[in-house]
């Protein structure tokens, strides 16, 4: 949770409602018209005979007041919450006491109440014995099962979705019901809730309701990967699992699976090989889940068979977490060998990438490629959504014959925001960008505002969100990136004011653009009988694209570049900002190359290290630089590196330096805390503490993994500390759950860390905080000469762990600086609990970094 000091409104709630529910209806006609398909699995993943539908829950009679933490959450964290045993019991809040009352589900099993925009629902479930069931919740953000945090299913707000829409019927979590009374506490934010308990078909079973499948191409050989969910309803990690695939014309394949952690789910990839049918349609495939030599579960799925020229899904293994993802491509209609253009099209909220690709009529001169944002809602094309877009861009460039000068970016609604965000963050990747109905930023659209009363520690903390500031990066569109803006004049979902605001900023910086405002049009519109939906497949937009190209570095003499985090974006053409003075504050450089003098000259702001690429220069004579008013200095041309690095001295002067060591902060590894979640990251949980300490560490790791699966189609290795071997997991980011006393990996990876945590205290440099209610998150380098990191999620006691359940760093936009320390005893409706926040120095030291303490420096 980001403290209320950061928000005036709940941004996740507002964006989910506006971009999800409304946009869902806006795009209905387009999808019907295009005949978008979603292959449904055959049969339910469980026996329906023993399903238990919850018909009554107890809720608070009013919405909870806003605050850094709501009143019930505060009690949960501090350990003094008691489950209501009867109606009429009170919960104290800053605005008076709220009353627990019972409500009943409607005939379809749905609970609906106006308070569900910010409320909890509680139900006690009695069991005649210890058993494992599948919790199928709908509409809730998360749930505590006997106090353990589990992922919710907030996007499923109806029982059955049309086959052309994204499906959210896959949230089936194994939970342990103890003999006697069990407590289920649901966090509700979207107005509706439904709860069903299902028997497990087997203690280890398949759930094929969340497929990531490639489309097979008619008559072509198949050598692809697909993915489904394995449910582990046992208390032990399940190894030695495999999936066997059989189908007509397919080779029988048996794919070994990664370990599935206890009492959770995991999305697992499997191989599919053979030959696709010679007719389009659907192909049945049988799956068998094996434990060793024994078949423990079976299911039947269907793959879609497409013509070569049809929009189609392609799968790939993501470098982010090793999961299987897909992108959609609408191939160019021309089969000539000439290089083609690439149009990267980013979708709106609650839109599948395949639907996005099918919204366009195919182009003769280029391929339309649609990444997924990791899910239909995903990450608003920021965080891991940004990484997914760049992964797919690089894959498409390698797979297809792409003209490097003809790469374009476009998208609608949330994808319009993605176009703005990706466009200003990576300006040299696009010849032109075309946002349609796009919102600008979380600040202008979601209602988020920094409050003036935020203390210095909180302000330093909030800096971690600065890469989301699209307005601060608009100058990156100067000089050579075309901009074409499309918006409906009567758009009620994303008001046209969003376009006006961005145009004002473009005008301020002297950036040329074109704007088309469609009279009388709403959010989604198609005013033409021509193939393709006009609000995205707008002919003048593609005509504009055709007249723009990406210039080569040698053609560019002036570069204006800004970044908020060099670990996100560090270079534009030949100019790089590799390190900052004030980390995560906006950094800028405006540099001109004077060919006749072989001199780089210009000005910078908040830049500690510059990189200048030289391989495009025609002259290999000595290089001169004159930065920030400094007189020209000449240095020999660096033949080996063909790049010049400049570092800023404390007096503001600049000097050359050797190629920076990877031990230093740079584009390869810069922070923030979430910077540890990008290199095939894995979770390692503690087993060396007390049973309670170990359970807290595992529960948090499992909850984070489930959150990343639900929000980002993720699949994370979750292993105990005793199973970790550094050499076996080289080249990967490692997230540690636990502290120095409870996690056996700590000393191996964090012995030299300036931040240390044990069961009694947290030490940050020379400062020590004592107590059992503390928690912290931070990032440290892992491999000194590599790019990997160690992320730490740690606490001194139960209160600290419960507080960490409220830190939503696995969600979009939310972040933390390089490190943050929290105190659960300090939280309240007006207190964030943040005790310290900071950024390590360029050398990853505390001494050269920036640290703020709430209670003094």
Image: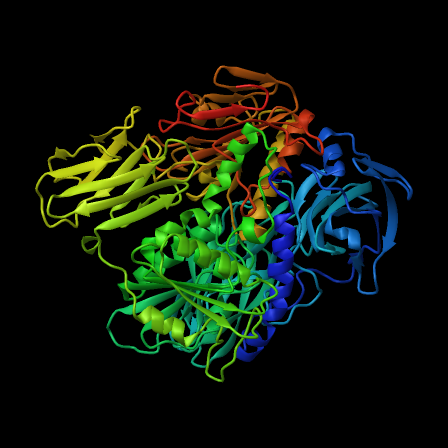
Residue 747, position in %: x, y? 46, 23
* Relative to 765, 704 lies left or right: right
**Relative vertical location of residue 683 with respect to residue 27 in this rendering, above or below:** above
Question: 655 or 511, which is in the foreground?
Answer: 511
Residue 623 visible (yes or no):
yes
Q: Quadrant of the N terminus?
A: top right
Quadrant of residue 93 in the image? top right
* Relative to 382, 654 lies left or right: left
Residue 248 visible (yes or no):
no
Residue at (18% x, 45% y) in the render: 614
Count of number-bearing discs: 0
Quadrant of residue 641 in the image? top left
* Relative to 713, 725 lies left or right: left
Question: 671 or 575, which is in the foreground?
Answer: 575
Q: How is the image coloured?
A: rainbow
| Residue furthest bottom as drawn | 529
Question: 154 or 203, which is in the foreground?
Answer: 154
Question: 353 or 613, which is in the foreground?
Answer: 613
Residue at (55% x, 71% y) in the render: 524
**Relative vertical location of residue 460 with respect to residue 516 in this rendering, above or below:** above
Residue at (89% x, 39% y) in the render: 89
**Relative vertical location of residue 853 with respect to residue 183 in this rendering, above or below:** above
Quadrant of residue 296 in the image? bottom right
Residue 202, position in %: x, y? 66, 54
**Relative vertical location of residue 822 with respect to residue 381 in this rendering, above or below:** above
Residue 487, position in %: x, y? 50, 67
Residue 691, position in %: x, y? 66, 28
């Amino acid at each position: 949770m980001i403290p209320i000091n950061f928000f005036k409104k709940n941004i996740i709630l507002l964006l989910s409602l506006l971009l999800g529910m409304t946009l869902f209806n806006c795009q209905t006609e387009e999808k019907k018209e295009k005949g978008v398909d979603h292959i449904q699995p055959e049969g339910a993943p469980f026996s329906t005979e023993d399903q238990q539908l919850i018909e009554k829950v107890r809720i608070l009679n009013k919405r909870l007041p806003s605050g850094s933490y709501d009143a019930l959450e505060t009690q949960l964290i501090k350990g003094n919450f008691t489950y209501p045993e009867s109606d009429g019991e009170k919960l104290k809040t800053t605005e008076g006491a709220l009353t627990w009352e019972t409500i009943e589900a409607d005939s379809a099993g749905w609970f609906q109440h106006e308070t569900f925009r910010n409320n909890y629902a509680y139900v006690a479930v009695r069991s005649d014995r210890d058993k494992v069931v599948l919790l199928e919740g709908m509409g809730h953000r998360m749930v505590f099962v006997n106090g353990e945090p589990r992922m919710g299913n907030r996007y499923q707000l109806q029982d059955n979705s049309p086959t052309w829409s994204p499906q959210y019927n896959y949230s089936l979590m194994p939970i342990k019901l103890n003999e006697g009374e069990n407590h289920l506490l649901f966090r509700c934010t979207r107005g509706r809730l439904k709860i069903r308990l299902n028997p497990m078909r087997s203690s280890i079973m398949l759930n094929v309701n969340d497929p990531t499948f490639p489309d097979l191409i008619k008559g072509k050989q198949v050598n692809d990967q697909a993915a489904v969910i394995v449910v582990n309803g046992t208390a032990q990690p399940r190894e030695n699992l495999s999936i066997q695939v059989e189908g007509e014309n397919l080779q029988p394949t048996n794919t070994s699976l990664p370990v599935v952690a206890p009492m959770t789910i995991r999305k697992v990839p499997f191989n599919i090989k053979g030959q696709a049918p010679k007719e389009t349609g659907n192909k049945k495939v049988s799956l068998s889940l094996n434990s060793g030599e024994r078949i423990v579960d079976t299911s039947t799925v269907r793959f879609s068979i497409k013509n070569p020229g049809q929009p189609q899904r392609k799968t790939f293994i993501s470098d982010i977490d090793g999961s299987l993802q897909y992108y959609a491509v609408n191939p160019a209609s021309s089969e000539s060998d000439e290089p083609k253009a690439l149009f990267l099209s980013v979708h709106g909220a609650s839109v599948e990438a395949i639907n996005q690709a099918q919204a366009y009529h195919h182009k003769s001169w280029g391929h339309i490629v649609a990444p997924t944002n990791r899910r239909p809602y995903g990450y608003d094309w920021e965080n891991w959504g940004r990484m997914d877009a760049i992964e797919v861009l690089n894959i498409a460039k390698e797979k297809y014959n792409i003209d490097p000068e003809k790469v374009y970016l476009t998208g609608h609604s949330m994808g319009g925001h993605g176009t703005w965000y990706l466009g200003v963050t990576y300006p040299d990747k696009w010849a032109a960008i075309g946002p349609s109905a796009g919102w600008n930023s979380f600040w202008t659209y979601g209602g988020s505002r920094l409050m003036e009363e935020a203390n210095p520690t909180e302000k330093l903390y909030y800096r971690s969100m600065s890469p989301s500031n699209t307005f601060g990066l608009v100058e990156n569109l100067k000089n050579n990136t075309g901009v074409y803006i499309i918006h409906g004049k009567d758009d009620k979902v994303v008001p046209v004011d969003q376009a006006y605001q961005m145009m004002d900023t473009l005008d301020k910086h002297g950036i040329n653009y074109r704007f088309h405002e469609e009279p009388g049009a709403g959010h989604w519109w198609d005013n033409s009988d021509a193939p393709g939906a006009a609000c995205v497949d707008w002919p003048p937009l593609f005509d504009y694209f055709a007249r723009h190209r990406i210039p080569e570095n040698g053609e560019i003499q002036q570069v204006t570049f800004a970044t908020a985090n060099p670990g996100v974006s560090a270079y534009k053409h030949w100019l790089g900002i590799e390190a900052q003075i004030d980390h995560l504050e906006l950094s800028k450089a405006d540099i001109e190359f004077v060919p006749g003098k072989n001199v780089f000259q210009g000005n910078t702001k908040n830049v500690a290290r510059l990189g200048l690429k030289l391989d495009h220069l025609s002259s290999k004579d000595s290089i001169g630089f004159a930065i920030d008013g400094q007189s020209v200095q000449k240095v020999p041309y660096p033949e080996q590196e063909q790049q010049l690095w400049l570092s800023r001295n404390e007096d503001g002067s600049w000097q050359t330096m050797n190629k920076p060591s990877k031990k230093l902060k740079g584009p390869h590894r810069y922070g923030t805390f979430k910077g540890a979640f990008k290199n095939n990251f894995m979770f390692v949980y503690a087993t060396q503490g007390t049973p309670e300490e170990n359970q807290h560490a595992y529960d948090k790791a499992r909850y984070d993994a489930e959150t990343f699966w639900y929000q980002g189609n993720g699949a994370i290795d979750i292993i105990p500390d005793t199973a970790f071997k550094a050499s076996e997991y080289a080249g990967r980011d490692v997230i540690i759950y636990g502290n120095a006393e409870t996690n056996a990996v700590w000393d191996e990876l964090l012995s030299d860390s300036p931040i240390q945590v044990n069961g009694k205290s947290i030490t940050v440099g020379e400062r020590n905080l004592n107590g059992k209610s503390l928690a912290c998150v931070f990032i440290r380098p892992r491999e000194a000469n590599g790019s990997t990191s160690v992320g730490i999620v740690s606490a001194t006691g139960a209160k600290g762990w419960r507080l960490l359940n409220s830190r939503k760093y696995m969600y979009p936009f939310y972040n933390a600086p390089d490190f943050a320390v929290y105190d659960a005893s300090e939280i309240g409706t007006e207190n964030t609990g943040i005790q310290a926040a900071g950024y390590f120095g360029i050398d990853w030291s505390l001494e050269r970094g920036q640290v703020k303490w709430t209670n003094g420096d």
